[in-house]
Image (cartoon, rainbow, N blue to C red):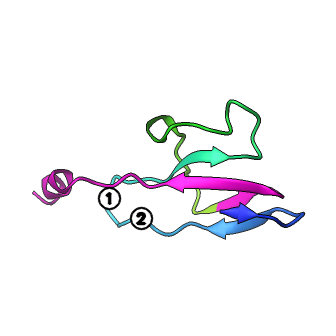
Amino acid sequence: MLNAYWEPLTFELPPVLAGSQQRWRRCVDTALVSPGDFRPGDRAPFVEQVIYVVQPRSVVMLVLPLQLAAESDAMVS
């Protein structure tokens, strides 16, 4: 998400599959103080909200790790 505006903007996150263990993770938020502004995907904090407020003139990158087919089959069984 990119906010080139001078005020914060609120973004609604795409929903994850119901019953899935997947959750959004915040890898980059340039409005945060370093070292909190960047975290590798496997160590990035989870985003618990369904919206994300992007601060003025900043960039946010959220990731949703892919669920492996074997994991998804195990959930069905």
Q: Residues within 10 Å of mark 2 (few under 14, many from 20)?
A: few
**Picture quadrant of residue 67:** bottom left
Tell me the amino acid under the disc marked 2.
Val
Q: Position of residue 32 (x, y in %)?
A: 75, 41
Asked if 26 appears above or below 77 in the picture, the reply is: above
- Residue 61 sits inside the magenta stretch: yes
Q: Residue 60 magenta-drawn?
A: yes
Q: Please, what secondary structure does the residue beneath circle 1 have?
A: loop
| Residue beneath the point at 76% across and 63% down | 3
Does 41 sit above or below residue 9?
above
**Splitting the image into 4 quarters, where does residue 72 fall?**
bottom left
Instruction: Looking at this view, name the residue that lies furthest to the right.
Output: 6
Q: Which residue is mark 1?
A: 20
Q: Amino acid at mark 1?
A: Ser
Q: Is residue 3 above or below residue 28?
A: below
Q: Is residue 34 above or below residue 50?
A: above
User: With 38 as the anchor, is 55 left or right in this view?
Assistant: right
Question: Which residue is label 2 attached to?
Answer: 16
Q: Secondary structure at mark 2?
A: loop
Specify the segment rendered in magenta.
52-77
Within-10-Å neighbours for mark 1: few <14, some 14–19, many 20+: few
Q: Are marks 1 and 2 in contact (CB under 8 Å)?
A: yes
Q: Residue furthest left?
A: 77
Figure quadrant of the N terminus: bottom right
